Amino acid sequence: MKFDNYMVLQFPSKSCNEAFARSAVACFAAQLDPTMEELGDIRTAVSEAVTNAIVHAYPDELGTVTVRCRILKDNVLDIVVKDKGIGISDVEQAKRPMFTTGGADRSGMGFTIMESFMTAFELSSELGKGTTVHMRRKLSRRQ
Amino acid sequence: MQFTSFLENGKLTIALNGEIDHHCAKQYIQSIAAKIEAYTPDICILDFQEVSFVDSSGIAVVINALRNMSQIEGRLMLSGISDQPMRVFRASGIDKIVEIKEAVS
Ligand SMILES: Nc1ncnc2c1ncn2[C@@H]1O[C@H](COP(=O)(O)OP(=O)(O)OP(=O)(O)O)[C@@H](O)[C@H]1O
Ligand SMILES: [Mg+2]
């Protein structure tokens, strides 16, 4: 697919990288001249996907998280968040609101938020191989 | 992470600040629980005025505070919520289970 610009981030699954990842993607998205609301939605969806990779994908060790962003035609930001962790056995169940394997400090709303804040959302996963979240957000053209 | 809180006539106000994500949420959950346990207020207000970002980890902070307050048969209220946190609370339905107070000037 034709694209105008792209960037790739790679970092270990440490929680201090959550703020870094969502801020870096927001900085990259700034060239599309997004509204405050659009930028907030992008930061939130990236935070959810990256936090999942950090919390769930590598429960007992550190692993690598990759975030890839592309700018597609018609002001579309394309975001892929990928890990090589434990994977998800049932992706439909995982996407259900309030489903969590995480206990009292998780709410099970991460995928629900990604789906509602992005214009396209796709979750794919293989047990023992890893998980990929693919999201797109079409941005309004201002001025 | 640090926050201020004050107690006045059984009303405990806790002013949160910064970005509430998974990296800091656990500390917030524990500190809020400790304050509620120490003061057993009738009402607890979580003030979001200085909070610039929340994700689903922030939802867990609110739900845990709600649980702490219902254990002592008190009320939980949220105040001063700006646009980004409000969109997250709406998307998750939190706005339907917790009282949200408009910011008073
Ligand atoms: N990258 C991943 N690797 C393995 N399992 C995952 C991954 N992402 C999500 N999951 C599984 O899917 C479930 C649902 O994820 P979701 O983000 O919706 O909720 P949560 O992370 O449990 O809670 P919250 O996001 O509200 O803090 C998780 O509890 C976990 O079991
Ligand atoms: Mg999550």
Image (spheres, coloured by chain):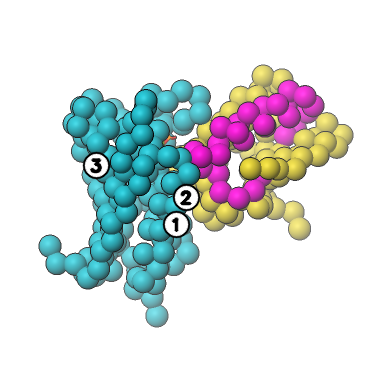
Chain colours: A cyan, B yellow
Q: Earlier in the sequence, mark 2 or mark 3?
A: 2
Q: What amino acid type should be assigned to the residue bearing mark 2?
A: Ala
Cα separation, mark 1 vs mark 2, equals 6 Å
Q: Are marks 1 and 2 in contact (CB under 8 Å)?
A: yes
Q: What amino acid type should be assigned to the residue bearing mark 3?
A: Thr
Q: Is residue B6 visible?
A: yes
The residue pinned by badge 1 equals A23
Q: Please report the residue visible at 28 percent of the width from the left and 56 percent of the height from the top.
A: A8
Discs 2/3, front: 2
Which residue is more in the foreground, B39 or B10? Answer: B39
Name the outermost residue toward the right. Answer: B9
Chain that bears disc 1:
A
Q: Which mark is residue A44?
A: none
Give yes or no for residue B39 being in the magenta stretch: yes
Disc 1 is placed on an element classified as helix
Name the outermost residue toward the left. Answer: A1
Cα separation, mark 1 vs mark 3, equals 20 Å
Residue segment shown in magenta: B16-44
Chain that bears disc 2:
A
B16 vs A43: above or below: above
B56 vs B73: above or below: below
Q: Please report the residue visible at 42 percent of the width from the left and 25 percent of the height from the top.
A: A102
The residue pinned by badge 3 equals A132
Q: What amino acid type should be assigned to the residue bearing mark 1?
A: Ser
Image quarter hosting the N terminus of chain A: bottom left
Q: For the residue carrying disc 3, how many other residues have a C-alpha within 10 Å: few (<14), some (14-19), or many (20+)?
A: many
Q: From the viewer's perspective, is A143 left or right of B51? A: left
Cα separation, mark 2 vs mark 3, equals 20 Å
Disc 3 is placed on an element classified as strand
